Image: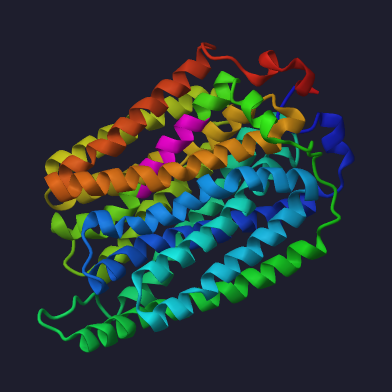
Amino acid sequence: MHASPPPSAAAAMPGPSRLLPLVIALFFAWGFCTVLVDVLIPKLKATFSLGYTEAMLTQFCFFLAYFVVSIPAGLLISRIGYLRGIVLGLLIMAGGCLMFSPAASMGWYPAFLAALFVLAGGITIVQVAANPLVAGLGDPSRAHSRLTLAQAFNSFGTMLGPIFGSSLILAAGVTEPTPGMTDAALAAFRVEQAGHVRLPYMIIAATLVGLAALCWRMRRSPVPAVRPVNHGDYLRLLRVPQLSLGALSIFLYVGAEVAIGSALVNYLIMVGATTSEHAAGNLIAVYWGLAMVGRFIGAWVLRYMAPGVVLAGCAVAAASLALLAGTVLEGTVAAVAILSIGLFNSVMFPTIFTLSIDGLGEDTAGGSGILCLAIVGGAVVPLLMGMVADRAGLGLALLVPMLCYGWIAAYGLLVRWGLIGRARRAQPAAAG
């Protein structure tokens, strides 16, 4: 009657206490990799003389992988299991990181987009497996709290990632090509500037291979059961309102979070909070660090408060801050407003995720695939925000994530008031 195995099943598994820290490490790893795109954007934007819309193609290609890979990943994991799926995903992530080296040598923007797509494809596989796995490793009644705690370590990765990336990618500055450069000089300039991207991704690739080896050693650990799924199961699951509307909420949440993170460097310089891209890149760590703090707090709060209420309250606060940041546009107040959104972003993803898969039982892998498919919002919403920014400025563009948060607040209240159907009522046979 919960997304995780029944208590008797959970109690019978000796592996969770040993496996949970490893799975939480995965959350850290993909958070660290994902947030580096925020640091990469200003570097590539200057190197290749891109507009906001063109620069946001980095996020579009990265999060497009979720749309392309999520359903196949759910099918794959339902057949080979959570841990083997995670190993495969980590190796694909490492392959994507290695692709940054030839992309830098060519100094060609589309090659960077291809590397980001492959990296994100691996992350998608890992995420489709890890989210339901961590929810199922232990007491089902604590699934919301446990996934929020794991997401806190994801935010720890997203806090450290910008500092790491900024020190290696932005420390040398962000330089645009000189007008009137010859084609040969322009190509040499782009190769030289793109070379700053190579080292951090080589370091990450080596780390991911080591993490994959560790997961392979743990592949026989007891984990929750996964029922094989097919495409027909996805269509059936989409008829569960709590899951389908939850997928829409994931789409809008990830889109809003990524859109704001992607614009932070340019926004902070625009409002006068700093004049250095390196310093602005470091301030991205504040945005994600507040999300980490909020998730540790949320893991405790969700033990005592209804998740729908917590979700709605945080979404209203985030929408209000986005509106403030979009209207003030000057100095410390604007910077504090936009960075503080990270605090209220904190519990949204894990709370939406666990609310959406509640009651799916052995269909959880299929439900997770649908929810990870919805992460494609990180491709669509930033691109939309970039288009608005090119035409009307970054301030007005912040209305885009503000509207996203408005729907998320509505979803939390609809679930709390019992106005949308749950899997346990729609599919009694799957409830266990």
Magenta-colored stretch includes residue 33: no
Measuring from the top left, give residue 184's x and y in whole percent.
24, 88
**Residue 408 location in percent, x, y?**
41, 28
Q: Position of residue 43 (x, y in %)?
A: 29, 70
| Residue 77 visible within the image | yes
Q: Which residues are magenta?
A: 247-258
State whether residue 307 appears in this view.
Answer: no
Instruction: Name the quarter where the C terminus is drawn.
Output: top right
Determine the residue positioned at 41% across, 83% down. 105
**Quick check: 414 above or below 406?**
above
The quarter of the displayed image where residue 323 is located: top left
Which quadrant does the N terminus fall into? top right
Q: Which residue sits at x=55%, y=19%?
A: 241
| Residue 351 position within the rendered picture, expressed as x and y whole percent measured from the top left | 54, 33
Judge whether 425 appears above or below 383 on screen. above
In the foreground, 390 or 210: 390
Closer to the camera in the image, 214 or 117: 117
Horizontal side, residue 172 vs residue 396: left or right: right
- The main secondary structure of the magenta stretch is helix
Give the side of residue 7 with respect to residue 193, left or right.
right
Q: Residue at x 78, y 38 (%)?
A: 228
Q: Return the residue found at the far right.
A: 12
In magenta segment, residue 253: yes
Q: Quadrant of residue 145?
A: top right
Question: Which residue is farthest front?
Answer: 183
